Image (cartoon, rainbow, N blue to C red):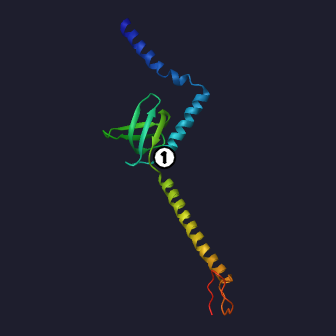
Amino acid sequence: MKKYLSLVLGVLMLHASGYAPLANETPKEKVKRAMLAAEVKTSVANLGTGVSSRVRVLLHDKTKYHGHIIEITNEYFVVADAKTGATAPIAYPEVKGIKGNNLSSGAKIGVGVAIAAAVATVIAVIVGRDGRDNDRAQDSPCRLSGVTTPCPPGCVCTQ
């Protein structure tokens, strides 16, 4: 009985020691971990779900996941492995780092609006130049009609 009791006590102590780093965290470390979890949650939400939302996730316990996000909740997100298709729910506070490689729909809309604005600006500049050139041409001394003196060099005079 003593051997059994000492074995159980040893296992419980080892199990409890696994939580020691979290219990020994300073308030500053807790705040930093909470801020990181919030950033991860925002990043995951921006990436979205589906095959195009590929991610590489590194957890605090050095576990790595490579795949795409298939589900997002308030508490965790689910990554499907790229090769095997196996899924793994990952809580936001467990994540040490995450990298994704797709643009969110908001970013795609922003890029489209920026391109459209650039094209509109170029068109406005071109149209504005043409209008100013025509106005200058009408006021130019080169547009003389009924001139009896020789036409100045570089001008077109009409009779």
Kindly identify the amino acid type of the residue bearing the numbered disc 1. Ala
Q: Which residue is mark 1?
A: 45
In this rendered view, identify the residue nearer to me: 148 or 131.
148
Residue 139 in the image: x percent, y percent? 68, 82
Vertical placement of residue 149 versus 123, above or below: below
Vertical placement of residue 132 versus 101, above or below: below
Q: Quadrant of residue 101?
A: top left
27 lies left or right of 106:
right
Tell me the quarter of the image containing the C terminus.
bottom right
Residue 72 in the image: x percent, y percent? 44, 44
Residue drawn 56% across the image and 22% down it: 24
Circle 1 Cα neighbour tier, 10 Å, few/some/many (<14 / 14–19 / ≥20): some
In this rendered view, identify the residue nearer to me: 83 or 141.
141
Residue 34 in the image: x percent, y percent? 56, 35
Residue 37 in the image: x percent, y percent? 52, 37
Q: In the image as oriented, which residue stretches furthest toward the left?
A: 84
Vertical placement of residue 7 versus 144, above or below: above
Q: Circle 1 sits in a helix, a strand or a loop, which is it? A: helix
